[in-house]
């Protein structure tokens, strides 16, 4: 997985930072398990996985040219925060936002990927073309992955937070062992 550069344990969480030599650059990322108190996480999970939660159909995951099975070619999203357009429900993420210590928030977006018979890898993408930070909060545990720069696989474990450079290539996958794979993506400075 790479060189572990720092590990911090508290009663609530375990944070491990990694630095990997990728030849022409270093890949730095951090994984924080049990990122927020279980009661705070339960509120977020129950809010998002509620049958009345408003998900929006998105007809392509990364690009229209990728040849995917129909069930893996779309997903559902929810924009909690985009630029100056914010929803009231953004406040539910206060414990995460406090943990991120972000100076400026660009976007908070929920993602729901339907399960597939086999794990499908979506194409690489970058969130924005300029330097910024990204974080992914995993809402449910499943066998889907986030893959950083085609080499680093991060498992989807509920109440886990991945911090990474979202201006570098990364990709998502579907899952096979749950009805869906759900996470929340944060882009910030």
Image (cartoon, rainbow, N blue to C red):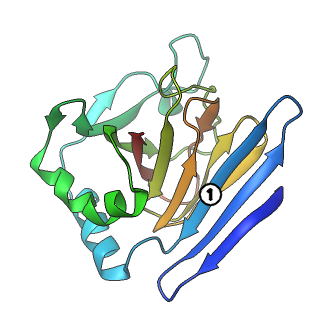
Which residue ends up furthest to the bottom in the rendered image?
11
The quarter holding residue 96 reads: bottom left
Question: For the point 15% across and 53% down, which residue is it?
Answer: 89
Residue 68: x and y in percent read 59, 24
Q: Which residue is mark 1?
A: 30
Q: Report whether residue 118 is seen.
A: no
Left or right, 173 with respect to 84, comes to: right
Considering depth in this image, is 53 or 161 the residue closer to the camera? Answer: 161
Which residue ends up furthest to the left in the rendered image?
88
The quarter holding residue 45 reads: bottom left
Left or right, 45 with respect to 179, comes to: left
Tell me: residue 14, above or below residue 86.
below
Mark 1 falls on what kind of element? strand
Residue 150: x and y in percent read 75, 35
Residue 7: x and y in percent read 68, 73
Question: For the point 50% across and 12% down, which residue is it?
Answer: 64
Which residue ends up furthest to the top in the rendered image?
65
């Amino acid at each position: 997985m790479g060189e572990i550069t720092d590990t911090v344990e508290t009663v609530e969480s375990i944070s491990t930072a990694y630095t990997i030599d990728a030849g022409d650059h270093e890949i730095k990322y951090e994984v924080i398990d049990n990122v927020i108190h279980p009661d705070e996480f339960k509120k977020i999970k129950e809010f998002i996985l509620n049958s009345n939660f408003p998900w929006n159909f998105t007809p392509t995951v990364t690009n229209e040219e990728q040849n995917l099975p129909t069930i893996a070619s779309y997903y559902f999203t929810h924009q909690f925060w985009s630029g100056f357009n914010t929803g009231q429900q953004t406040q539910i993420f206060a414990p995460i936002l406090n943990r991120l210590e972000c100076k400026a928030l660009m976007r908070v977006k929920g993602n729901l990927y339907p399960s597939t018979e086999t794990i499908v890898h979506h194409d690489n993408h970058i969130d924005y073309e300029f330097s910024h930070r990204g974080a992914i909060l995993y809402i449910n545990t499943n066998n889907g992955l986030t893959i950083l720069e085609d080499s680093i696989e991060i498992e989807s474990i509920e109440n886990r937070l991945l911090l990474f450079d979202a201006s570098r290539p990364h990709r998502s996958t579907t899952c096979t062992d749950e009805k869906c794979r759900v996470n929340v993506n944060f882009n910030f400075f």
